[in-house]
Amino acid sequence: MKVKEKLLLSTGVLFAMIILLTALSIIYINRLSNDTSNILVANYNTLDYSRKMMMALDDNIANKTSRQQFEENLHLQHKNITEPGELEFTDSLTANYKALLLHPSDSSVLHSARKNISGIMLLNMQAIERKSKIAAETSGNSIFWITLIGTICFIIALTLFFNLPGNVANPIRELTESIKEIAQGNYARRIHYPGKNEFGELASSFNTMAEKLEEYQASNIQKLLIEKKRIETLINNMNDPVIGLDENRKVLFMNNVALKISGLKAEDVKNKPVQEIAVTNDLVRSLVQELFAENKEKADNKQPVKIYANHKESYFQKQIIPIKIIPTGETREVLMGNVILLQNITPYKELDFAKTNFIATVSHELKTPISSIKMSLQLLENKQMGSLNTEQQNLVDSIKEDARRLLKITGELLNMTQVETGSIQMSVIPSSPDDIIDYAVNANKTTAENKNIKLDISIPVNIPRVFADKDKTAWVLNNLISNAIRFSYDNSTVLITVTEDNNKMKFTVTDNGQGIAPQYIGKIFERYFRIPGTKKEGTGLGLSISKEFIEAQGGYMTVESEFGKGSSFSFYLDICR
């Protein structure tokens, strides 16, 4: 039988039994109501009339009040005759009453009247007893049938309660579990459900689907193996090292280049935890430490990895690519593993070294002729060599300014080459902030006076010393003040402050110039970056070199700027305690 038919039949029978129970209840309740109504309306009223007439006879029928009471109840009794023989007693009682009206003291008539009233009462009492038995029988029948039908309904409902949910839910649960196994690749799973109902048909269709999936899987295994070989060949023929890890950080593959530079063999690393390999292999340990790093700052380090490969010191840019997918039918992204890719940037690094060496050589060679030019300019300005006319003096001033600018550029280029080659020589010792500020302010005093800019200095009294390279830090502060003067309007103020901030000494240079547009704030410390549209001189190296110098001393630099209102550059150094 179909599940739908079972449900319809079960609920239909239960519904019919409930209707039958309701109908029987209504019928028997109506019967009981009619029986009790007959007793109350017909017989009880007659007994009441008879009692009142008997009382009227006892009170002396000759009394007007008693006579009126007797007449009213006799009249009502004539309208309420319901039992056989009751009419004869009532008519005889009427005749007795008329005789009493003529002879109120006639004892024989009075006795006859009492006898007729007693007859009427006896008939109605017998009727009440008979009708009470009928009502009791009706009540008993109603209790029996209602109990019987209610019990049957309860048994049917209880049977449906225990059997129906299981009959529906169990096959669905089994089907759900089977579908989950199919989704996990167990195509050999089958459902065995007896019967020819809907669940049997569903089980048969599911088994057919599973069988076809199993055949499809078997037919595609060969294709998958071919594709796997193709991908492995592609990875092994890549010129860059590649390492694949699964979600448990076990090694899935290492291509030939990765095996070569690490000195490992494929059979020694396949399906092994990468941390186990890292214990004995320094290169693997350096490559995977980012995966286990708790410090996110270290994990974000993008410095090239230096490896001895191809018989020389080589450089590789490491990239860890997380493999995340959303499984079919799900909504949450799942991490399936990671791929470590090492891009060989040795040729670019060699070109960068060549560029740096070239710049360093050229800058160093330029300093000598520039210094000679400055020396010649000083001789030209010497009065002992002769006086210069106005035009000649203007030319000398112009040459002097260009020589100064060239000397500054070559100095920045030389500093930049030190930063790039990692050859910055720092002498970090306790230093006085006053000395650092005095040097930077004196170096920019003439430039500030030419633009009528006031250098406002704010330093606390008895300020503690800081750990710093005095010359490099003075150079940084000099660069910040020079920039502030260059980008400030004439007749304005440049504020130089020194304050203590969270166990650090904070040096700040604030100007009231045009400020920096928000989109350029993040690029201001990049090498060679200059704000588009600016007409001020510069190489775009000063802030980048300043940042490198401060960080090399264990400090850091920040910038705050509101476009149109000015900028504030700060650097922080450790305080001597």
Image (cartoon, rainbow, N blue to C red):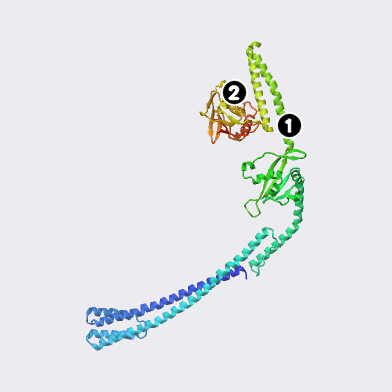
Rendered location of residue 550, percent (x, y): 61, 32
Q: Residues within 10 Å of mark 2 (few under 14, many from 20)?
A: some
Q: Is residue 371 visible?
A: yes
**Which image quarter holds the C terminus?**
top right
Rendered location of residue 271, percent (x, y): 72, 52
Q: Quadrant of residue 83?
A: bottom left
**Which image quarter holds the N terminus?**
bottom right
Rendered location of residue 192, percent (x, y): 67, 67
For the residue labelled by badge 2, is the local secondary structure a helix, a strand or a loop? helix
Whole-angstrom CA distance, mark 1 to mark 2, is 34 Å
Q: Quadrant of residue 504?
A: top right
Q: Is residue 74 visible?
A: no
Q: Is residue 207 above or below residue 104?
A: above
Q: Quadrant of residue 417?
A: top right
Q: Amino acid at mark 1?
A: Ala
Residue toward you, 273 or 166: 273
The residue where tag 2 is placed is 443
Q: Furthest residue to the bottom?
A: 108
Residue toward you, 118 or 312: 312
**Which label belongs to residue 354?**
1
Q: Amino acid at mark 2?
A: Ala
Residue under the image location 28 percent in, 81 percent down: 53
Q: In this rendering, would 170 be left or right of 235?
A: left
